[in-house]
Structure formats: C-alpha cells, structure tokens
Image (tube, grey):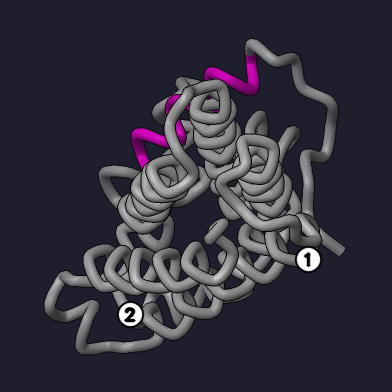
C-alpha cells in the first residue's frame, strides 16, 4: 500500500512544506535529504513533520505530483493554440523532457541512486500515465478534428504513444555510461523525437 499523509493538512501548510522540501531536494538530492533536514528548514520539530508525513519519499512524491500538475497546466494551454499537430507534439516532447530534468535534478540522481530508488520512480510514472495518456488523446483528437490525421482509435493510439515513451525512457535510464557522460536528457529527447516523427507519419492524412 502506498504511503500518504498521516493527517489531513491545509493547502497553505502543504504548499509551504513542499516549497521548502523542493529547495532541499534540489540542493542535496533525495538520498542525502532527511526528515530532520526538512523540519529544520521549516523551523519545526521532526515530530511535527512526521505528524503529517510518514517519510521523505512521501514528501518527494508530493513535490513531483505538483510538478506534474504544472506540466499538465502548460499542456492544456498548448491545446488551445492553433499550432499544427506536428508542432504541438514536438512542443509536448520538449516540455516532457523539462519535466524529466526536474525529476532528475530534484533527486540529484546518479545511476546507482536511481537503481536503488526505482520503486519510487516507477510509482510516479504509473500515477502519471493516465494523465499523460489523456493529454495525448486530446492532442490526437484535435488533429483529427482539423483533418490533419486519419480517423483512429484515439484512446488506443494515445496509450501506445505513452507506453513507448516510457519504454524508451526506462531503457535509456538503465544505461550507466549515459549517466556518466551527463547525456541522459539529451539521449531521451533524441529517442522521443525520432519516435514521434515515425508515429505521426503513420497517422497523418495523405
């Protein structure tokens, strides 16, 4: 069972905790941050923080959930634009990479740290899947409505698109040499863009 807050917390208090925790994670990473560190930064006792959260991983997930919300908000605005489907999906990929970089930077990840905390990141990805699939489905439906794409099963194609992105991401993150070279986000972006071109080519109106 996933660990969540132990006790209900007001939006204002939650926002303050997440702001402070995010700064700590960005500077020291998840592995080197403790509940005591976050409590000290907040100016409260460790017991007070444990009253609301069972562990630092729960706080980290809340921080990333908020980042996901920001990402989705940006994409909703993108859906209101008049850009063509290829430009929309390209912009989507660029923002998706920025979200991934935020995730990696907040965790101050190395190959070893990522490998040791895979369940946490797998959980974040699983929770985000449906939101991302729905966004892609909206983008594809808009392409169909504007006669840029063939008529397809939007839900199936959106699910396939997100599954492939996830598979490409997980494979790239497993390559230790890319971590050592500092090329994780660049390599993932290259793979994402290549797949997106192939994907679009298969469903564009002739």
Q: Position of residue 163 (x, y in %)?
A: 63, 72
**Residue closest to the eye, 102 or 153:** 153
**Residue closest to the eye, 113 or 126:** 126
Q: Is residue 16 magenta?
A: yes
Q: Is residue 13 above or below residue 145?
A: above
Quick one: which residue is furthest to the top in this view?
12
| Residue at the disc numbered 1 | 156
Residue at 44% of width from left, 85% of height from top?
171
Q: Is residue 178 above or below residue 20?
A: below
Which residues are drawn in magenta? 13-25
Residue at 40% of width from left, 28% of height from top?
41
- How many neighbours does mark 2 have within 10 angstroms: few (below 14), some (14-19), or many (20 or more)? some
Front position among marks 1 and 2: 1
**Residue closest to the eye, 81 or 34:** 81
Q: Is residue 61 above or below residue 13?
A: below
Location of residue 164 (image quadrant): bottom right
Q: Position of residue 63 (x, y in %)?
A: 54, 39
Can I make out residue 29 in this image?
Answer: no
Q: Secondary structure at mark 1?
A: helix
**Residue closest to the eye, 89 or 50:** 89
Q: Position of residue 117 (x, y in %)?
A: 52, 73
Location of residue 115 (image quadrant): bottom left
| Residue at the disc numbered 2 | 111
Q: Secondary structure at mark 2?
A: helix
Location of residue 14 (image quadrant): top right
Residue at 87% of width from left, 64% of height from top?
1
Earlier sequence position, callout 1 versus callout 2 = 2
């Amino acid at each position: 069972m996933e660990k969540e807050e132990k006790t209900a917390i007001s939006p204002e208090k939650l926002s303050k905790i997440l702001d402070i925790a995010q700064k700590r994670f960005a500077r020291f990473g998840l592995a080197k941050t403790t509940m005591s560190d976050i409590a000290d930064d907040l100016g409260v006792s460790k017991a007070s923080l444990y009253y609301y959260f069972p562990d630092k991983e729960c706080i980290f997930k809340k921080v990333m959930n908020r980042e996901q919300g920001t990402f989705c908000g940006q994409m909703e605005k993108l859906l209101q634009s008049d850009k063509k489907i290829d430009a929309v999906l390209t912009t989507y990929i660029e923002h998706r990479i920025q979200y991934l970089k935020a995730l990696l930077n907040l965790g101050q990840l190395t190959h070893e740290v990522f490998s040791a905390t895979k369940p946490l990141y797998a959980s974040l990805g699983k929770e985000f899947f449906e939101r991302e699939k729905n966004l892609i489905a909206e983008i594809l439906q808009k392409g169909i409505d504007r006669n840029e794409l063939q008529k397809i099963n939007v839900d199936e194609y959106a699910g396939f698109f997100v599954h492939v992105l996830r598979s490409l991401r997980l494979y790239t993150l497993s390559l230790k040499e890319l971590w050592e070279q500092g090329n994780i986000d660049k390599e993932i972006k290259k793979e994402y863009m290549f797949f997106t071109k192939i994907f679009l080519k298969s469903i564009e109106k002739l």
